[in-house]
Image (cartoon, coloured by chain):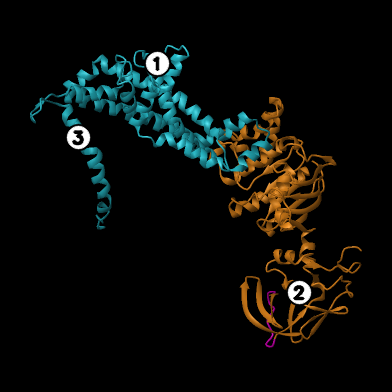
Chain colours: A orange, B cyan
Amino acid sequence: MARVDLANIRHAYGPNPAKDADYALKHVNQAFDNGGAYALLGPSGCGKTSLLNIISGLVQPTQGRVRFDGVDVTDLSTEKRNIAQVFQFPVIYDSMTVRENLAFPLRNRGVKKAEANRRVDEVLEMTGLKAQARRRARGLTADEKQKISLGRGLVRSDVNAILFDEPLTVIDPQMKWELRAQLKELHRRFGYTMIYVTHDQTEALTFADQVVVMYEGEIVQVGAPAELFERPSHTFVGYFIGSPGMNVIPTKLEGANVRVGEYLAPLPAAPKLRGEPRLEIGVRPEYVRFGPEGIPASIQRVEDAGRLKIVHATMEGHPIVAVLREGEDLPADPHITLDPKGLNLYADSWRVAFPGFPGESAP
Amino acid sequence: MKPVNQKAWFLVLPVLVLVALSALIPLMTVVNYSVQDTFGNNQFFWAGTRWYEQVLHSERFWNALLRNLVFSGIILAIEIPLGVFVALHMPRKGWGVPVCLVLMALPLLIPWNVVGTIWQVFGRVDIGLLGAVLSGAGVDYNYVQDPVDAWATLIVMDVWHWTSLVALLAYAGLVSIPDAYYQAARIDGASGWAVFRHIQLPKMARVLTIAVLLRFMDSFTIYTEPFVVTGGGPGNSTTFVSIDLVQMAVGQFDLGPAAAMSLIYFLIILAFSWVFYAVMTREDVQPKADKEGAP
């Protein structure tokens, strides 16, 4: 296991990149701690798979260095980096049995037969594939095949990190839960450094201790799931994480207050801003309250989502989404207030920090 | 009782008519000839199994059949590995792909008798590029007089003509392998040979089965090219069953024995193809059997 450092990584697939738009990865600096469970979360095409492939060495970055435990591995081949990677579609060697599949990486590295057998037995145990060991890998189900792909990584005792590239895409829904639980269990028992690429927020938030959110070739926020939810550092994070996403409403600043139409909402302090940025407030639907006072709103429609009700309304000409918990009802003449706890200010889409206030990172 | 809808027959009918006209009726004519004797004038005499016995006891037939088997064996042993080798080295992207595909398809587009003519001239010692160069270099080459040279010419011609079919099929199998397989192999530290043996070859197995079947059936019924190049000679050294058959039917007008021979020939090809297919697709059935057998 190792700590993985990415320093000033830029990557372009085309030759001679000039503008920022030519880069699939614009500028990435990120450290993955030894034994951490990370998720790389973002929409399709945001560069998360490129980043993963740069770590494993399948892709050479245009610029920047990759270090494992401080050792520069940028110029090392995939094989030498000693990485395990599980792909979106299960990769198995059709003509081999499950056992032979698992032994394959060891055989290629010239590991002695007795040692290889011992390792394979261990991995069969870890992945729960013992019963299928002598079967042809070709005849297995998708989730069993995916376990083989994973097992081929685990079988090398000294892998630096295990990388997952949307590994549950082709797995049946009920098996997804089981496999994900098994991954977490492996992480807990053996402390592997795991990096998990996904575009599914549920998958990312349940798997990882730290979620790295990517957008258009950049990392926009790294944090624990709760942090991403409460303090999205970019409007994209607010929109991408949470369902329904965060409300983003244009605003004007008046001292330590933000103005929406006739209504003023308090900020922790008067923000220091450079220049004249485009200002927006971001409020999660969970922090939008209905009551007899506040900004007058008109209700467009109400969706019943089981235990919650999702209310689509307009307020001062801006659409806004709110969540009603079980038992809560809409008042006859609805007015909206925004809970200051959940109020975030964005300047040019990036969150304005108020260092030193509760719920904020240290100054 | 549930009424049976007979409309489906109308939908199948066109196919039945086509197959009947193109295959079944001609085949029945051959069956008809094979059990009768005729001297023209539409006069037929019942011959029973006489022609079959005659063909099966004739050394001429068995020799021709043996030549067919040896020929098919040799060209399969050359064309399949060579085709795979070529496919492995064809470009996967860029401008090279269409260029390569067109070049490879060219020999396949040439009519067979033209292929024969090309090689017939190409190999001539007096004016042919190949023949003249070889004899100029002091090689004793003459496909008209030397059976070995005649065989070599036919084999090289067939390899030239058909390897690209095998290569194109193998290439189709290769490009259908997702990148993730190669990436996983790199992560697993697989050597180039291991990638070929455990990824590329298994993924090509299906198309190679088809390639082997096509090349076997084609080469086993080969007629046009050797007929044009060697005419079955020198002596009988390149007389394959089909050439023999035409000589018997058209040259000697022995319609009965020729019909019996073509039916035997047909059954042999059918049996061979079936055996090939059964053997080569056996692996596909196995995992299923495994599953049922597993506790």
Say left or right for B134 vs B47. Answer: right
Asked if B143 appears above or below B22 in the picture, the reply is above
> Which residue bears the numbered disc 2?
A287
Q: Nearer the viewer, residue B147 or A28?
A: B147
Neighbor class of circle 3 (other Cα within 10 Å; few <14, some 14-19, many 20+) is: few
**In the rendered structure, which disc, 1 or 3, sits on the residue that comes first in sequence?**
3
> Marks 2 and 3: in contact by CB < 8 Å?
no
Instruction: Give the dominant element type of the magenta stretch: helix, strand or loop.
Output: loop
Image quarter of residue A252: bottom right
Say left or right for A18 vs B88. Answer: right
Neighbor class of circle 2 (other Cα within 10 Å; few <14, some 14-19, many 20+) is: some
Quarter of the image with the N terminus of chain B in it = bottom left
> Which residue bears the numbered disc 3?
B28
At 23% from the left and 16% from the top, the residue drawn is B57
At 79% from the left and 64% from the top, the residue drawn is A233
Q: Secondary structure at mark 3?
A: helix
> Which residue bears the numbered disc 1?
B149
Q: CA distance from mark 3 to mark 2?
A: 85 Å
Q: CA distance from mark 1 to mark 3?
A: 40 Å
> Marks 1 and 2: in contact by CB < 8 Å?
no
Q: Residue furthest front?
A: B127
Residue A10, position as x, y percentages in the image: 76, 50
Residue A63 counted in the magenta span: no
- Mark 2 or 1: the one toward you: 1
Q: Amino acid at mark 2?
A: Tyr
Question: In this picture, which residue range is highlighted in magenta?
Answer: A324-333
Q: CA distance from mark 2 to mark 1?
A: 91 Å
Q: Nearer the viewer, residue A136 or A88?
A: A88
Q: Are marks 2 and 1 on the same chain?
A: no
